[in-house]
Image: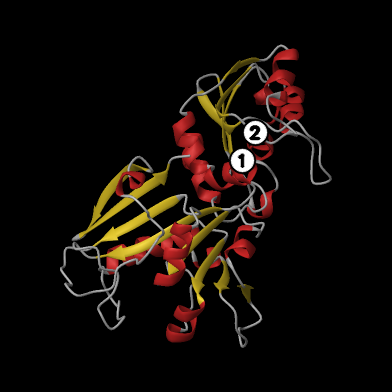
Amino acid sequence: MGAALALASRGIGTTFPNPSVGCVIVGDGRVIGRGWTQPGGRPHAEAVALAQAGDAAKGATAYVTLEPCAHVSPRGPSCADSLIAAGVARVVIAAHDPDPRTDGDGVARLRAAGIAVTSNVRAAEAEQQLAGFLTRLKLGRPHITLKLAVSLDGAIAMGDGRSKWITGERARAAAHLERARADLIVVGRGTWDADAPTLDVRLPGLESHSPRIGVVGRGDGLPDHVSQFPDLAALAADPALSVLVEGGMGLAASLAAADLVDTLLLMRAPILIGAGRTLGDIGLADLPHAHGRWVAGPAMMLGPDRIERYTRTR
């Protein structure tokens, strides 16, 4: 399953409108097929892996990071039916698929065909990978990640608004990797007008993973390739699975006040700014209400900077 999860990570940010799934097929003690969801959402991971395995898939075990889909679409057959037709003997699944077109029917169909099914293997890791897909189904909106580069004393810019650069080169490269994993990257109108950011991915080999660009705020003069969202409601209505918010301070505070931030990505630099700008008012009425909202995830050091990830509990 670890190999399937690693494969799924390759497609994140490129498979809209589908989630990125990984699949590994093992027969006679060796890997005979592997795949991940292809750009644009098709073929699915299982279809790619089964094509590699060919006739050797009969009697094999398939490891998939998401319950195989149970619905036929104009773009291809259901993965549950494809696994049955291939004659696999066992399917090991990480995460349950809450899509009403599948929602347990994939597992039921496999079992009805005499295939052994094991579920919830490394489910938490798979659900983290599938956060955009799951948020879309559960909350009806994209999964929103707010990225903030901060100093040790919590400032996100100097008093006059300058913020280039709080973190070092390695942390900024990690920010570009986050861009590559998003369907949409947005900034506030003030940041767009002040900085004219390109918001593309500038990592060798990942340039083609640059996401769609959006600006939140009203006003004219945006380029044709930039989506405009007049308010947060319009952003929440976008069909993207995952949104990365990079600035500015007003947009970040508004998202936090509206409780629309699902993941908080802090890139903390070992510097003190002093009289700098902070996030601002997020509508917190009482300090006890701030506790219990965020769960710390894995943290890592990139050069002198510490990268911290927090997930909103709901």
Residue sitting farthest toward the bottom? 221
Number of numbered discs on residues: 2
x, y percentage for residue 104?
Answer: 68, 24
- Asked which secondary structure carries label 1, the reply is helix
| Residue 302 numbered tag | none
Disc 1 crowd, CA 10 A, few/some/many (<14, 14-19, 20+): few
- Residue lying at 67% horizontally and 31% vertically, measured from the top left: 68
Camera-near label (1 vs 2) is 1
Rendering coords of residue 152 (x, y %): 19, 62
**Residue situated in front as seen by the camera: 284 or 211:** 284
Per the image, the residue denoted by label 2 is: 98
> Please, what secondary structure does the residue beneath circle 2 have?
loop
Residue located 67% across and 20% down the image: 88
Place of residue 308 in the rendered image (x, y in percent of width and height, measured from the top left): 30, 51
Residue 164 falls in which quadrant of the image? Answer: bottom left
Residue 76 appears at what percent x and percent y?
A: 79, 42
Residue situated in front as seen by the camera: 268 or 45: 268
Question: In the rendered view, does 166 fall on the left or right side of 13?
Answer: left
* Residue sitting at x 36%, y 45%: 289
Residue 155 visible (yes or no)? yes
Q: Residue at x 48, y 39 (%)?
A: 314
Task: Find the residue positioned furthest to the front.
Answer: 285
Give the camera-side residue of 125 and 43: 125
Q: Amino acid at mark 1?
A: Lys
Q: Does the residue at mark 1 contact the one at mark 2 (Cβ under 8 Å)? A: yes
Residue that numbered label 1 is attached to: 138
User: Which quarter of the picture shows residue 27?
Assistant: top right
Task: Between residue 41 and residue 167, name the one nearer to us.
Answer: 167
